[in-house]
Image (cartoon, coloured by chain):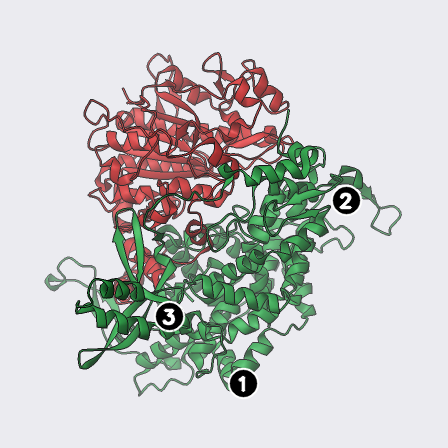
Amino acid sequence: MLNRTSVVLALGLSLAFTAISDPAFAAKKKSSPKPSFIHASDVFSVGVRVKVGKKFKTMNVSCLDSVPGMTQNVKGGLVFNSYSKLASRLQKAGGRSPKLPLYKALAQAGKSACTKPDFLSLEKYKGPFGAAEARTLYDRFGFGATPEQINDAVAKGLDRTVAELTTYVAEPWLEQYEAELRCDARPADDFDNETCDPYNPNDIYDIGTEFGFVAHMWYTSKPYFDRMAFFLHNERMAARGQTVGGSDGWALIAHINMLRSAAITGDYRQFIKDYTRDYLGHLRALSGATNRGFKPNEDFGREIMELGTTGPHDLNDKPVYTDLDVASAALAESGWKIDCDEELLNPDPDHDGYWICRGGYFEGLHAQGPKLMYAGTSQAAIVYNSDDLVSLLFNHPRTAEHLAEDIWSEFIGAYANPTAIKDLAKVIRSNNYNLNATMRQVMTSRAMFAARNRKSLIKHPVEKLIGFLRTSGIPVYGYWNFYNMFEDMGQHLLSPPTVFGWNEKKLAHESHILDWRNALVSILNSNTNPETISNSDSDREKFRKQHKRTFSYFDRFLAGLNPAQDPAGNLVNRINDWFNLDLNDAQKGLLAHFMNCKYVSCSGSSCNGLPDKESCDGFYPDASNFDSNERRVKSLLALVAELPQYGVK
Amino acid sequence: MKRDFTRRDFLRLVSAGTCGAAVHRVLSPRNGMLAFGAPATLPALGSQAVLVVVNLAGGCSYNIAPIYHGAYRDKNPTISYGPENSLILTPDQGVHPSLTYFKKLYDQGRLAVMNGVAHPQNNRSHAESTENWFSGIYDGASATQGGWGARLTCQMASVFGGVSLGGSISLMQGSCNDGRSFGDLSNFGEDQIFWDSRQSRYLKAYRDQVIANSFVPASNDNLAYVKNASDNLAASIDAVKSATNVTLPTSYTEPGDATPTAITFNGGFGASCRDAAKLIAGTALGVQLIYLEHGGFDTHQMERNSLPGTLAEVNAGIQALVLTAKAMGFWNRMVIVTMSEFCRTFENGSQGTDHGRAAPMFMMGGAISGGVKNMPPSPAQTSGDYYNLMDIDCREPFKHVVYQMGYDHNKVFPGPINMKNLSLFL
């Protein structure tokens, strides 16, 4: 009785080669003359100036890679015809068509425009670096920024800003703060805080760990590294923290540390190597602990290729690996298991040990012997173990391309063509798979600041929420609030729904827009003003009031506005800049009106049955109207953060 | 369809003409194309027909409909089921012991079981196989036509024709309009700012105007997507809240039962089924296609530990939905179809199963002609990689349903399909 494993192990190379060379196994059937269909996103359009008759006109040209042409819907799909081919056809048909000179002109003019449009170019950006560009950087790589940080970035310029953003500085206080959250979801200064057991590595509460992860994103002065850790967590074999618990909760912390270490060093190759030894990711979430050499489990073998390295297909739609390769990869990764034991970690001799599970590699559980990968291709090789496999995968041209695809769609723009992906893959390879060096080039590229890429990426809920808090400076009390907000918005950090992580588009549906609105209301409804302590307060209530972080909306948002010079309009402009909204004049006008007016109760025959009427008595940002101003500013914030423009970056 | 460049979409983009090597050898979609045998009768489901698609996400094990012969059990020594511990449908096959209500529907003649159902291009990638099912087309180059759910929704009059309760997924995204996507409808409402109804009204009055005035560049598909969702929401809140403000029955006595069965919607999937029931009952919305999803079927290890519970949740949710449909009188115009991106292999070394291809599919409804519609893999087939053997193109059952709904099935599923001309409706 044969299965794929025994094919690989027992029949070895000859059968594998035979199978792959069998025409029936061909990746894509070559069938007869049928139009060569393309996908709509294969092409992009650029404007070119061409001479039509005696006049110059700007016309849109479709580009397939670097070839100018036009698309056409035919039965079965979309086809692309290059202008040079169309011109050649007309020429052969006698050359008298009036379209011939136009097609020739478009073919010529489109050549350079299609080759390197700015939104696909990784060449160095040489344009201005103002607040809008700084906002783009911080929205994509830093969960937003305060206006002060933006001003600082503009003053320093692009290169220095990127250098500082991507240079790691340890923040011991934040590590301590996060560590204290992990066992009970309460910071050290919480009245009900319990001290985490320093000797028990499993004194972990998954919700507390999630809070810690969120708090780190919120408070760090180096948000780029948290953003990259989130990228790896989400895009590259997403692991669920909930798969570990009382006896192996430590593994969640180890997994976070692995993500952060990869983000800090930028060493993607080391990240994948570390992942092959990761308890949470490899052994638990992807079944590595039960992948035995004599009867393998293919889970990790498949996902390390599909998600971690090569991806399933190349840029020409051809499969990168076969089922036999998955089986071989599983065998190469076999040999791990989990053992649990009591460990005496507390130095107190009277203290009991802790029951702890750990993973270990056992040569006897590993599939011995050679495993054939990529049979019948130019990448064909024999691997024996995990290190061999990882080396082979990183030598595969697709690994850099697949990483480039994810980086592009996560950080640069919603559209890329194969040429752009190849360019970015080249950058990744030239940086020896170092993400930080690669990202520095991405962050200073023409594509990063191209108009077409501006606001073209959907924010994750975590980016909307943390970005709002980082930009505004509004404090939120009680991490339980975060738990509910993230649960409602569908993005429990460290607990992705599948190994594929979250799909930000999936999280932008109507109910989640409502959830985001309600999260905003929850934040803005929080009372941040100082509270008076009374003798009748309980100890807990006294403690809360004493330690409450206060926040003045008046000072934060209205400082410097001149009451005599269109304060409503100027506030709207300020908010537009801070939250990177790209408001147009009509929107600004509506929002200024919103600030100048309010609803008041309506009664009488002129009300037409409506409960309210609008009363416009102006907006006066002075201290005498403190409460009223605070409410209006909060309303404005709620309104703008709900706009579609805030949902993209 | 305008597209962006998320990974899923990129995967879809590159999925054309691909699948596991062995797949091509086993089945060529060009082999033996049969004409679609249109049912002789007029559409059986009527003008308010509703199709509910239940995605068992993660790739479900064949043990949801266990095969009884020795070859299958030998291949799955610790995780398979026999007549002694499953619910018997035929001498050859049963349903998982957790699917008690499925068995009841089978006994009532309203559950059809199909074996070896797959998309001809299924490979063993979760993402790509899912996209193949959702696209409903053979050649990925036609992906510009969007998901088959969108092509169906395009034919419906109501803007609420297609609703996803399992996230916004490509099944519902297409060229004419995207299906609507909701989460838990019990939370479908807005909190008030400052607990002040007047200020909240004021905020909402301006918000919708400001959103409507957003400028979206022609090339910015993602911003258009987000704005579209916001615009839709503005039009949805009152309509959905009003239409779904229906009281669902709490029990129903099935014909032949002595006592009523309580109707309870528990857990996340149960909530989705409850919302589906409300959407269907709230006929003003005109919902005719609903997508539900339950994860947890990626059972690489210890399948016996997880599958019973996961299936019990599916069983309970569907039972509550069907009982509601029966009590409220829409059972005869509703069809529920399960799908899963792929089936799973025989047992691996972890008492689990890995990614395979062709799976069992269930179809149920008041107008469904029940029974096992084709044989499960034979002992001879099972001695090989039976999970690769596609017997039914996954588009065929859906195509029959679309026809019975009275819509143009050829627009929804264009291109040739190797039809078995299954007899699925009464």
To which chain does the residue with label 3 belong?
A
Q: What subunit carries mark 1?
A: A
Amino acid type, callout 3 = Cys
Residues packed near mark 3 inside 10 Å, few (<14), some (14 to 19) or many (20 plus): many
Q: Are marks 3 and 1 on the same chain?
A: yes
Viewer can see residue B249: no
The amino acid type of the residue labelled 2 equals Gly
Q: Colour of chain A?
A: green
Say whether disc 3 or disc 1 marks the residue closer to the N-terminus.
3
Q: Is residue A52 left or right of residue B76?
A: left
Q: Residue at x 26, y 45 (%)?
A: B160
Q: Which numbered marker is on residue A156?
A: 1
Task: Give the farthest residue toward the left.
Answer: A605
Q: Quadrant of the C terminus of chain A?
A: bottom left
Local crowd at mark 2 within 10 Å, few (<14), some, or many (≥20)?
A: some
Quote the CA–CA distance across marks 2 and 3.
53 Å
Return the residue at label 2. A360
Q: Secondary structure at mark 2?
A: strand
Q: Quadrant of residue B38?
A: top left
Residue A540 is left or right of residue A295, and the answer is left
Q: Position of residue A499 (x, y in %)?
A: 55, 47
Kindly report the distance in space between the C-alpha atoms of the residues bearing marks 2 and 1.
Answer: 49 Å
The image shows residue A609, relative to residue A132, as above or below, that is: above
Q: Are discs 2 and 3 located on one and the same chain?
A: yes
Q: Marks 1 and 3: in contact by CB < 8 Å?
A: no
The number of numbered discs placed on residues in the rendered structure image is: 3
Q: Tell me whether circle 2 and circle 3 mark residues in contact (CB < 8 Å).
A: no
- According to the image, label 3 marks what residue? A114
